[in-house]
Amino acid sequence: MAYNNAIPQPNDRIKDSQSQILQNFSQIFTVFGLNHANFNTANAGKHNIVSMPVQAVNPVTNATEVALYSKTGAVTGVPELAFRRNNSGLVVEMTAGLLAQTGWCYLPSGLLMKWGATASATFPVNLNLIGPAYASLYNVQSSTRVGGPASYASTLNNTTPASLNIGIVGASIVIYWVTLGV
């Protein structure tokens, strides 16, 4: 039987609605136990897991609260864990990303990190073609695996589109790079 919020009625005698009340307690116990430690245990009231249905819109937050919720990722198109700052501020999709040799992810602070490995013949790299576009690009780090004597220098282009250009002198080379921005 489903939970019945209409019992007991004001004129009911407890003995007449006792079975319905017991069924309600049973339903409460069952539903509460889905993501929580059971009653009468040391962890009673605590979550075992947190399941969050996808929200259609970002929640409103006031000056003294933040929100942690599930939403469909703007880039990934799948449910992601999102964090909204106070005063309905910045929304960070904390689990969005592409975890591959050339990929990207959001950091919890809201920074966007991108990385990759690029052969010397394929520069410049248009960073806005990898994941979400950068509004501002802050930093680039690079290292190399050289197939012979070579040198390189990296430059950051913070225009639209943001790009990474590496000048290479010498042998065949693969550049491993990481960029940070928002």
Image: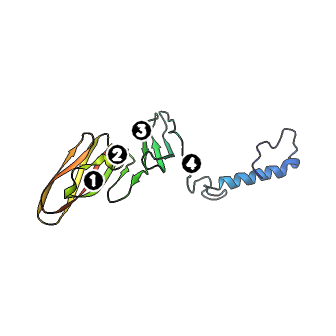
Q: Earlier in the sequence, mark 4 or mark 3?
A: 4
Q: Earlier in the sequence, mark 1 or mark 3?
A: 3
Q: CA distance from mark 2 to mark 1?
A: 13 Å
- Residue ranking furthest to the bottom: 147
Q: Position of residue 167 (x, y in %)?
A: 15, 52
The residue labelled by disc 1 is 178
Q: CA distance from mark 1 to mark 4?
A: 33 Å
Q: Secondary structure at mark 2?
A: loop
Dot placed on the residue nearer the N-terminal end, 2 or 1? 2
Pointer 4: what residue? 53
Pick the front one: 49 or 139: 139
The Cα atoms of the two marked residues, 1 and 3, are separated by 24 Å
> Residue 94, percent across and down?
43, 49
Q: Tell me the quarter of the picture where residue 12 sits.
A: top right
Depth-wise, is mark 1 or mark 3 nearer the camera? Answer: 1
The residue singled out by tag 3 in the image is 90
Q: Is residue 11 left or right of residue 31?
A: right
Question: Looking at the image, is mark 1 or mark 4 earlier in the sequence?
Answer: 4
Dot 3 or dot 2: first in sequence order is: 3
Q: Residue at x 88, y 49 (%)?
A: 15
Residue in front for this viewpoint, 35 or 116: 116
Name the residue beneath numbered marker 2. Answer: 111
Q: Quadrant of the C terminus?
A: top left
Mark 3 neighbour density, 10 Å: few (under 14) some (14–19) many (20 or more): few
Q: Nearer the viewer, mark 4 or mark 3?
A: 4
Residue at the spot 77% in from the left edge and 46% down from the top edge: 4
The residue at 62%/55% (across/down) is 44
Of the numbered discs 2 and 4, the one sitting upstream in the chain is 4
Marks 2 and 4, Cα distance to the nearest angstrom? 25 Å
Dots 4, 3 in contact, CB < 8 A: no
Answer few, some or many: residues within 10 Å of disc 1's Cα (few below 14, many 20 plus, some between 14 and 19).
some
